[in-house]
Image (cartoon, rainbow, N blue to C red):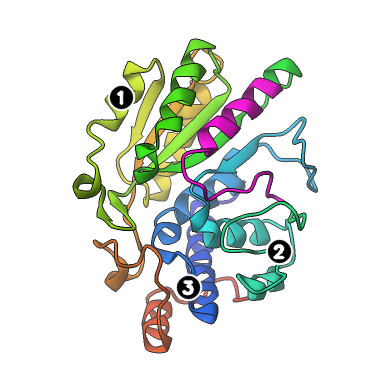
Amino acid sequence: MATISELEELVVQVRRDILRMVHKVNSGHPGGSLGCTEFFVTLYNEIMDLKEGFDMDGDGEDVFFLSNGHISPVFYSVLARRGYFPLEELHTFRLINSRLQGHPTTHEGLPGIRVASGSLGQGMSVALGAALAKKLNKDDHLVYSLHGDGELQEGQNWEAIMFAAAHKVDNLIATVDRNGQQIDGPTEKVMPLGDVPEKFRAFGWDVLEIENGNDLGQVIEGLKEAKRRTGKGRPVCIVMTTMMGNGVDFMMHTHAWHGKAPNDEQLETALAQNPETLGDY
């Protein structure tokens, strides 16, 4: 297990990876990626029980599904720095014939990616299916998933959420990134979501909240608590409040950087706010 200091260093370096990836191709989604950096770093380096190497089935280990696939930069960075594929491959982000497309895909066999994602609203159903498969296989490992809050405007989520509680899928931990922003503006202006924790509770889920999803200590304790609540007859939901664009002052408090890359000057400013810690790729 890593120390808090080591995880904090990794968070900063992952932020640098995200910024440099999207800048190079002038394309990608830095806002949500930066907001979920602490979550991904914690999940893959502190929480999940993972085997050496990668196999698509994920038998005998915890598995993770990214539903809001547009935040692929943070996912790719954390996978590479966890050893799933060479760090240098981050240079190929969004290039033609790259394994690191803008939304994760499976046809090129990128280690760590088990499902193509980015068509919002589908990840809950995928994670639910994987969790049921683990139960059928008598595999006591867990399934984790991440969902955008704007993504909850898709109705398919609520069918899966209802099914998971009805069938007591208690090996599933679904996290909602409650950053309050989506591509067209604040979620409360596009389509208000109401009280998200209470909605999940009304559907029969065990719900906990992480008040600051950009505080490593809170993320670590929140994910550990969620893990303790599994196996008790109910699926577990974490509603995690984050700041889109966290760590880069001019990207925060706005939806403008949902899918916009920094120019050369903006990149230098952003990198200066996140000094190199573990070495750029």
Residue pictured at 47% horizontal, 59% vertical: 8
N-term mark: 3 or 2: 3
Residue ID for mark 1: 199
- Mark nearest the camera among 3 and 2 is 2
N-term mark: 1 or 3: 3
Q: Does residue 253 sit above or below 43 in this rendering?
A: below
Residue pictured at 46% horizontal, 28% vertical: 225
Q: Is residue 28 left or right of residue 97?
A: left
Expressed as whole percent of the image width and height from the top left, the position of residue 148 reads: 41, 45
Q: Which numbered disc covers residue 256?
A: none
Expressed as whole percent of the image width and height from the top left, the position of residue 2 reads: 59, 50
Look at the numbered disc 2 and give the secondary structure of its residue. Answer: loop
Expressed as whole percent of the image width and height from the top left, the position of residue 20 reads: 52, 76
Crowding near pointer 2: few (<14 within 10 Å), some, many (20+)?
A: many
The magenta region covers 112-133
Q: Amino acid at mark 2?
A: Arg
N-term mark: 1 or 2: 2
Crowding near pointer 1: few (<14 within 10 Å), some, many (20+)?
A: some
Residue ID for mark 2: 99
Q: Does 127 appear in magenta?
A: yes
